[in-house]
Image (cartoon, rainbow, N blue to C red):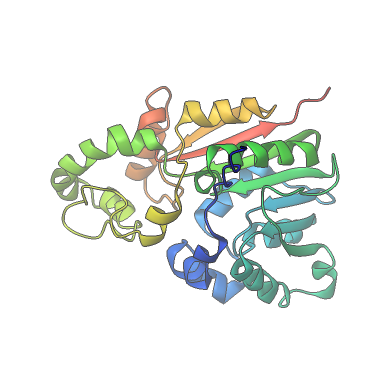
């Protein structure tokens, strides 16, 4: 007697509804006001790293509201965004209607699962994979990275962002939480940075850094550390380079800039930074 095959694991697409994209994700109000013409500091940093050039072909896998696609088109590229959430694609298409006919001709959105075929082989110069890795079980992540590698041209670049860095939550956050009363007295700038997390608003920080983050607790099934992400990318045939970022927020003032610079220095950045950005190249064979 043959055993029934094990059902494939995956977070249900229905969890990613309009409320998730407009309330749980950073930048919802900005998106509604500008339809992707202005973006969050996180998007700004990733776009700077990507360095998109006119005429390039760009794919955003797990595009969410579609801001990176919009920005790529405004930079002169042809861009396509895919997401398996119907509500995400609806928001993208609503934004697309606000652009000119010429811009819309270079902007496309489709409801596609990241584990499905993503397009023709060697079709894209740049692929974004932003805040998706932590939502995919390990076997899903491997399949998605293999699919991305297939559609990237040789030498093409994958720009991946994931948060939280589990090493930050495991090792640095408990210390920060204990020191937070002192930090409140010494550095209003650092407190203001902490306040950008919607659940870090009190005089003390929660024991669990994700307490109150209803969606994250349900959909983060594969949070990464620097070694685990590097290994996942190498296993899919990429040559990755990791950038550790304390928080992708707007940094103002000399004190906060200095703190950001110190926290970003290796090797301690692997623990002291909450976010990971990877630039991974498809080898030229």
Above or below residue 92? Residue 282 is above
Q: Position of residue 227 (x, y in %)?
A: 48, 26
Residue 20 visible in the displayed image: yes
Residue 36 visible in the displayed image: no
State the residue lying farthest toward the front.
1
| Residue at 56% from the left image edge and 70% from the top image edge | 31
| Residue at 41% from the left image edge and 34% from the top image edge | 261
| Residue at 85% from the left image edge and 67% from the top image edge | 105
Q: Across the whole image, how many numbered discs are drawn on residues?
A: 0
Left or right of residue 219, residue 35 in this image: right
> Foreground residue, 216 or 94?
216
Q: Position of residue 279 (x, y in %)?
A: 63, 35
Q: Where is residue 198 in the image (x, y as percent from the top left)?
A: 33, 61
> Foreground residue, 261 or 101?
101
Above or below residue 35? Residue 243 is above
Q: In which quarter of the image is residue 104?
A: bottom right
Q: Where is residue 242 in the image (x, y as percent from the top left)?
A: 55, 30
| Residue at 67% from the left image edge and 30% from the top image edge | 236
> Foreground residue, 50 or 283?
283
The quadrant of the image that shows the C terminus is top right
The quadrant of the image that shows the N terminus is top right
């Amino acid at each position: 007697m043959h055993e029934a095959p094990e059902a494939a694991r995956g977070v249900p697409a229905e969890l990613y509804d309009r409320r998730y994209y407009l309330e749980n994700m950073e930048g919802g109000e900005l998106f509604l006001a500008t339809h992707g013409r202005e973006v969050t500091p996180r998007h700004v940093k990733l776009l700077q790293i990507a360095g998109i050039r006119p005429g390039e072909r760009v794919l955003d896998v797990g595009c969410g509201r579609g801001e990176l696609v919009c920005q790529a088109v405004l930079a002169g590229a042809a861009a396509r965004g895919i997401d398996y959430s119907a509500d995400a694609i609806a928001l993208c298409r609503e934004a697309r209607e606000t652009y000119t006919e010429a811009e819309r001709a270079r902007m496309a959105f489709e409801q596609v699962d990241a584990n499905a075929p993503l397009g023709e082989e060697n079709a894209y110069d740049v692929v974004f994979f932003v805040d998706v890795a932590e939502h995919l079980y390990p076997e899903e992540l491997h399949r998605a990275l293999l699919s991305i590698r297939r559609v990237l041209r040789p030498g093409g670049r994958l720009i991946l962002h994931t948060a939280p860095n589990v090493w930050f939550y495991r090792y640095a956050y408990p210390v920060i939480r204990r020191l937070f009363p002192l930090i409140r007295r010494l550095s209003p700038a650092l407190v203001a940075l902490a306040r950008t997390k919607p659940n870090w608003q009190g005089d003390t920080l929660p024991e669990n850094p994700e307490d109150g983050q209803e969606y994250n607790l349900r959909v983060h099934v594969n949070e990464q550390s620097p070694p685990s992400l590097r290994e996942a990318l190498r296993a899919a045939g990429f040559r990755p380079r990791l950038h550790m970022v304390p928080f992708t927020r707007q940094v103002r003032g000399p004190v906060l800039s200095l703190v950001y610079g110190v926290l970003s220095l290796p090797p301690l950045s692997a623990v002291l930074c909450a976010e990971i950005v990877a630039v991974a190249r498809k080898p030229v064979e």
